[in-house]
Amino acid sequence: MNDKIPVSLQRCNSYDPDEVRDALNKVLAPLGGIQSFVKPGDRVLLKPNLLAPKPPGAAVTTHPEVVRAVALAVMEAGGEVFLGDSPAVGSLAVVLKRTGIMPVVQELGIQMVPFRTPVSVPVPEGGVSRSFLLAEEASGYDLILNLPKFKTHGMMTLTLAVKNMFGTVVGAAKPGWHLQAGDTVRFADMLLDIWSALPPGLSVMDGITAMEGNGPGSGDPLALGILMASPSALALDCVAGPVAGLPIERHPVLYQARARGLEGARSDQVQVLGEAVEDVRRVFRLPKSASRVDYRLPGWMKRSMRKSLNPFPRLNPELCTTCGACTAICPADAITLYNKPRTGGLVDKDKCISCFCCQEVCPERAIDIVPGRLLRALKKVNLA
């Protein structure tokens, strides 16, 4: 008997509605089709990536045609569709309008569910934490259907299916969790705990147009041309890493998942169906911050060499408008803006935790990432 976790890959080269619907049916077919996950009368929560109010072409958020195709599939199976998230920037309604998803919501009669009310949700045995304050509005469904976007990420290198469940943390609390986690290892453990506390029963990842470079909010669109699906968000991430040409040592979520022995974190626990990984692989240009090596070092070394090993944000005065988005979200209060009309500002490296929340929300793409001195030296000899 094959007890491996299935991960299905299907080519899809455009957001033409008919092509997306056809690709969705094909990517779900090896998993038993949507009817294997949705029964008549089921209440289904769609959880897209709605990071910020950006247009669909920016590749920051899940594309509206992917949302449409999945919602229609759920409805055809007899399910009742809800859509929820807690964007990092702006209200749910504002983000849905700007991303082009609001017309889909209105056309199909999808019920919007803003994540506003934090409640304690227990973490299953084996987690690092006992519980998390997550959105009450994300609980109580027959199925959470996770709709991540295939993107790079300044702190976690890639943001995929597991990371997308961080959206169940109510918006204003997100920066605080970055500060409480403090480093990459603990933040990866936190993401894994949140995923296990509110596990999606199906994840369908939008990789038709992915993002490379300085993701998740300031990177560049990349025509990857695939949809991916799996009943396990972690197994989906396990396959997505090699699709992006990323070794396990550079992917903190998978690195920690393997260290914890979580099922779906190893390639020998996963069965790839549909397209072969080597046929769709596209080596991504990674964020400059992805060169960090701190999470693979002993604690005493990380503490003593943090400023030399870590990359840090730097405000580009030629692009910065001193709008204050970075200072508003910085969990460590590490950024001081210059007084207008001067633009830009300073980052206090003693306070900065290298979470790159500032880069995520900057509307002008004015946050550069610069490596510490030792990290620069390691990069020159290909050790980072």
Image: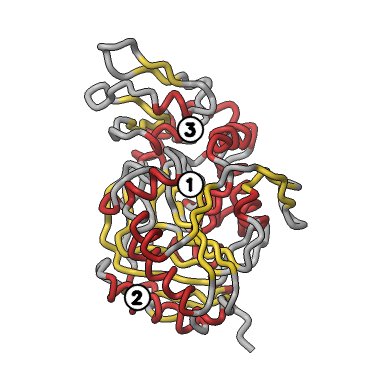
Q: What is the x, y in percent for residue 330?
A: 48, 28
Q: Where is 327 relative to 39, above or below?
A: above
Disc 2 versus disc 3: nearer the observer: 2
Q: What is the x, y in percent for residue 154?
A: 42, 42
* Picture residue at 33% right of the left edge, 64% below the top: 65
Asked if the residue at tag 3 contacts the one at tag 2, i.e. Cβ–Cβ closer than 8 Å, the answer is no
Residue beneath label 3, please?
354
Asked if the residue at tag 2 contacts the one at tag 1, i.e. Cβ–Cβ closer than 8 Å, the answer is no
Asked if the residue at tag 1 contacts the one at tag 3, i.e. Cβ–Cβ closer than 8 Å, the answer is no
Residue pushed farthest left?
Answer: 318
At label 3, which amino acid type do we have? Ser
**Structure colour scheme:** secondary structure
Disc 1 versus disc 2: nearer the observer: 2
Alpha carbon of mark 2 to alpha carbon of mark 3: how far?
39 Å
At label 2, which amino acid type do we have? Arg
Residue beneath label 1, please?
156
* Picture residue at 35% right of the left edge, 33% below the top: 362
Q: What is the x, y in percent for residue 94?
A: 39, 43
Q: Earlier in the sequence, mark 3 or mark 1?
A: 1
In the picture, the quarter occupied by the N terminus is bottom right
Q: Where is 3 relative to 120, above or below?
A: below
SS for tag 2? helix
Residue beneath label 2, please?
21
Left/right placement of residue 333 relative to residue 371 reads right
SS for tag 3? loop
Alpha carbon of mark 1 to alpha carbon of mark 2: how far?
31 Å
For the question of whether residue 245 can be seen, the reply is no
* Picture residue at 46% right of the left edge, 67% below the top: 204
